[in-house]
Image: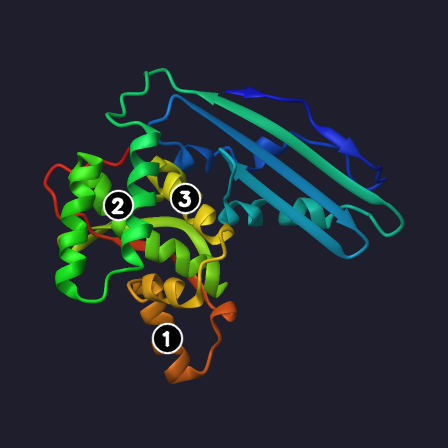
Amino acid sequence: MYAQSIVRIGTSTNAKPVMLLAFIKNEIPKYLGSKKYYWLRIYLAKHKDREIVEVRVNGSVCSELHKFFKPYIDSWDASSTFICEKQYGFFVQRDDDKCPFKKETVVNTARAALEKMVKVSNRDEYMAMADELEEIAGDKDIAAEVRIFIPEILAKLTLGYQEGDSLFLIDGDSKIEFKKTQLRSYFYIQQVVLEFLNKRPSQEDVQKIVLNSVAFRELKKVNQEQGHEPKDLYVPGTAFKIGTENYKVW
């Protein structure tokens, strides 16, 4: 691990800068996967009663890490000034990256999937799309991840509910929990979904895809039964199942 010195703006008589990475030193390994390199950015800011805490791993916000900085930032006296601190950490794994696929494979498969998903109107067409995605990806696992995560990511981005950092792999009767940052394809797919939204697709196209989201169906059920709006709800993470043998998280 390599750590940058603390960068600070503003002063406070009640607190001195400390090594920010130390607050989450026991949590960091949970967010590292099979990539060779990971970078971590911690940003804290406070002005009067307003506080901002943001932790990113390889550019992705990890909301579950924010709570570890709450007591520290609460101790700052920013009643008459603006204070912020940030620190970068860089992690290099000893083993080389042995991932069998490239980012471009996931991105191209996800783009093709979005084009096809807006045209699917029944189960037969969905199954035909699944077969086509396997041919495009050349890998059943990648095709399945793309097919599963696109609706879930799109639901999260458009409905506005809060979601944790975890993924839950369903394996028989058990669930294996790990972090999204440990599955590189998740953020490759999210990048493509954001590109899709930037093109301002029709509401009909968005809804057609989101209807395949498990989270959307569960939130709809909660809304009907209890009257809660999506923005008021929290989802710990996304559960998924890959129906192939020897599936491996890359």
Say which quarter of the image contains residue 222.
bottom left
Residue located beneath label 2 in the image: 145
Structural distance between the alpha carbons of marks 1 and 3 = 25 Å
How far from the left and from the top, in percent, is residue 27? 46, 38
Identity, as a three-letter code, of the amino acid under mark 1:
Lys
Structural distance between the alpha carbons of marks 3 and 2 = 13 Å
Structural distance between the alpha carbons of marks 1 and 2 = 23 Å
Closer to viewer: mark 3 or mark 2: 3
SS state under label 3: helix
- Mark 3 / mark 2, whichever is N-terminal: 2
SS state under label 1: helix
How far from the left and from the top, in percent, is residue 250? 29, 33
Say which quarter of the image contains residue 43.
top right
SS state under label 2: helix
**What residue is shown at x 24% (from left), y 61% (from top)?**
120
- Mark 1 / mark 3, whichever is N-terminal: 3
**What residue is shown at x 34% (from left), y 52% (from top)?**
150
Tell me, yes or no, whether the two marked residues, 1 and 3, touch with CB atoms within 8 Å: no
Q: Residues within 10 Å of mark 2 (few under 14, many from 20)?
A: some
Identity, as a three-letter code, of the amino acid under mark 3:
Val
Residue located beneath label 3 in the image: 192
Q: In the rendered view, would you say 129 is above or below 83?
A: below
How far from the left and from the top, in percent, is residue 129? 19, 52
- Mark 1 / mark 2, whichever is N-terminal: 2
Residue located beneath label 1 in the image: 220
Q: In the rendered view, would you say 11 is above or below 75?
A: above
Describe the colour scheme in one phrase. rainbow
Q: Residues within 10 Å of mark 1 (few under 14, many from 20)?
A: some
Identity, as a three-letter code, of the amino acid under mark 2:
Glu
- Depth order, front residue of 129/49: 129
How far from the left and from the top, in percent, is residue 113? 28, 48
